[in-house]
Image (tube, coloured by chain):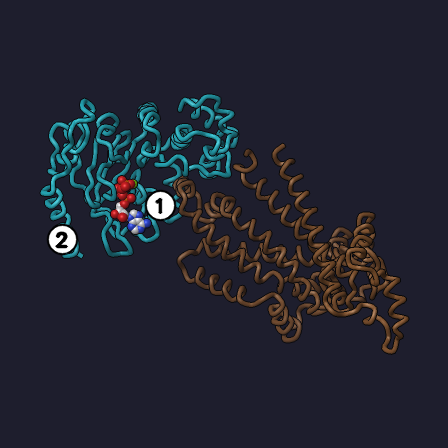
Chain colours: A brown, B cyan
Amino acid sequence: MQILRRMIARLAATAVTLVGVAVIVFVVIRVVPGNPIAMMLPPGATDADIQRLQELYGLDKSIPEQFLIWAGGVLQGDFGTSISLRQPVSELVLGRLPATLELSVMALAIAVVLGGGMALTATLYRGTRVEGAIDVTGGMALSVPDFLWGLVLILLFGVLWPLFHISGRISPSLGFEFQSNFYLWESFVRLRFDVWTDIVAHMFMPALALAIPLAAIISQLLKQSLKETMHLDYVTLARTKGYSETSIITREALPNAILPTLTLVGVQFTFLIGGTVIVERLFSYEGLGNMAIDAVINRDLPLIQGIVILFALIFTVVNLVVDMTYAALNPRLRHA
Amino acid sequence: MSFLSIQDLTVRLRGKAPILRRVSIDVAAGEVRALVGESGAGKSMIGKSVLGTLPQALGITGGRIILDGEDLEQLSPRARRQRIGAKVALIPQDPLTALNPSRRVGPQITNRLVDILGWSRKAAEARALELLAEVHIPDPARVMRAYPHELSGGMRQRILIASAFAAEPKLIIADEPTTALDVTVQKQILRLIAEMQQRHGTALLFVTHDLGVVSKVCQTMSVLYSGMVVEDTNVREFFASPGHPYSAALLAATPKYTDPDGSLTPVPETVIRAVEEEVAAFDREMEGAA
Ligand SMILES: Nc1ncnc2c1ncn2[C@@H]1O[C@H](COP(=O)(O)OP(=O)(O)OP(=O)(O)O)[C@@H](O)[C@H]1O
Ligand SMILES: [Mg+2]
């Protein structure tokens, strides 16, 4: 009952957030200089041409009027039409969403495995050189942003030692017909591992670039939290029962130490999704972020709005999921 | 032959300052030995040396710990852990922090039986239920499914006692098992430990500040000052005529049960100075020998 009420409160808050984001973005992209119509017309178009197209896209009306028209459409599921691509925004955006989701989730998985592994190893070898080496590595990983890691990876594994693809999402030569845009998922469930491997080889570097800073954060936070937990009485008691150091860490300490890390990982994951904008561009990966940059360059107002709303929605959903996981993992909250 | 024989155990802080000074303590099978001394004397460190849970900064630099005829320091870390897990158990000081908050009570009692001693889950659960009833917990089946935060401190200490006895260890180390509890609960828990010890015939190394408790529960005792055993005696003799001036002063500084509000004599300066001198002389001797 409690949980249900909390969920409803959260959903209401989410709705308010989304409206707020919509208003702000709507106003800001109309106030900054740059005319979408002028961008799309060839040089030498007459003022009359511009005027006609402005009317067509409703850009001649006042901002509040435009907003009401747009919001009315949104309520019916119509996010308008992209000015530069001349297709419905919802179609464009939903078509690109799977690519970005797959990339983000892959990056998150890499970050959790890398960061978690580093934290556990450092805890197992605490006070030794191994811990020192992991601390230094983590510090380095954190002091370089994701897109620079992208460049480093391109140099290493794209140029010097070409193990992975440096651009795109899939090799066009494969000629595989997808039924959805979840390429990674679909090729896996249809057991086409040749296609799957090709997709992973495309995704791996951008995902790793996004994952490295998050892995470092997870590693440092989880290690700190494990370190504190390892001194607690119930851990000591388990030690006297005859458990090995490894099982003490993974069975007794980890389930409790993971909670504070989890909250922060949620926040950091939203940053990671934000990071896809530049990283997708860098690797010419056909996701939402890449599309967002084109939309901004072209001053494609409806498309920008659609993408921003979708990003905002993703962020709030991620936070909601983190909260619920936290409650599920923490028995004190579950029974409260 | 004693079940536990600590011989000349020396523990140092980062290989330098001694924390335990050639401590020798024997506990025979079924014996209840008190370990008394003021705060910081090193009582807990003796228990931790045996259990293998010394803080990282501390290390054993001399002496032997013989458990059931085996020198623990000669064993591999893995074998040492398993011997301790099978033969020794700890009743911790603070029941509020000694149970894992994210696990149900049942698995915390049965885990040693299942994971370390290889019992079947079913047998371990039956055993846990039996022990919870033995420590007077009403509705043991419900408590097995509860999380620690749903239970009172007294209940949790009963659970930890049940858990300590679950594998029928030969020796239990109880490190001030009642100090963290309500005064009203303290007596019950103390009585319970004594009762369980008698029923199971387990040897008990009982760490405490409280000489009143010693007189009721223990047969033999070691008095510790600054990491040094100043007296090793049996309890009746200690209360009749303490053999060391520090012991005598400690006894005088303890409220009598017959007269709990009576005026107390703090340990006199001269006694402290004398025992400090003894410790210093001991250290010089140790340095000379090294
Ligand atoms: N982690 C540690 N690092 C360094 N020294 C420590 C550490 N823990 C304890 N000591 C030192 O070891 C000595 C013995 O401590 P111990 O905990 O055994 O005392 P105690 O007799 O159990 O006292 P109390 O009655 O307060 O529990 C103390 O002087 C203390 O300062
Ligand atoms: Mg102590």
Depth check: A129 or A14 in front? A14
Q: Name the residue beneath numbered marker 1.
A: B53
User: x, y (%) of residue A203?
Assistant: 69, 62
Residue A39 in view (yes/no): yes
Amino acid type, callout 1: Thr
Q: Is residue A273 above or below residue A158?
A: above
**Classed neighbour count for the residue bearing mark 1: other residues with Cα under 10 Å, few (<14), some (14–19), many (≥20):** some
Q: Name the residue beneath numbered marker 2.
A: B285
The N terminus of chain B: image quadrant: top left
Q: Tell me the SS state at disc 2.
A: helix
User: x, y (%) of residue B40?
Assistant: 25, 44
| Chain letter of disc 2 in the image | B
Residue B11 falls left or right of residue A78: left
User: x, y (%) of residue A249?
Assistant: 47, 48
Q: Is residue A304 above or below residue B95?
A: below
Residue A26 falls left or right of residue B65: right
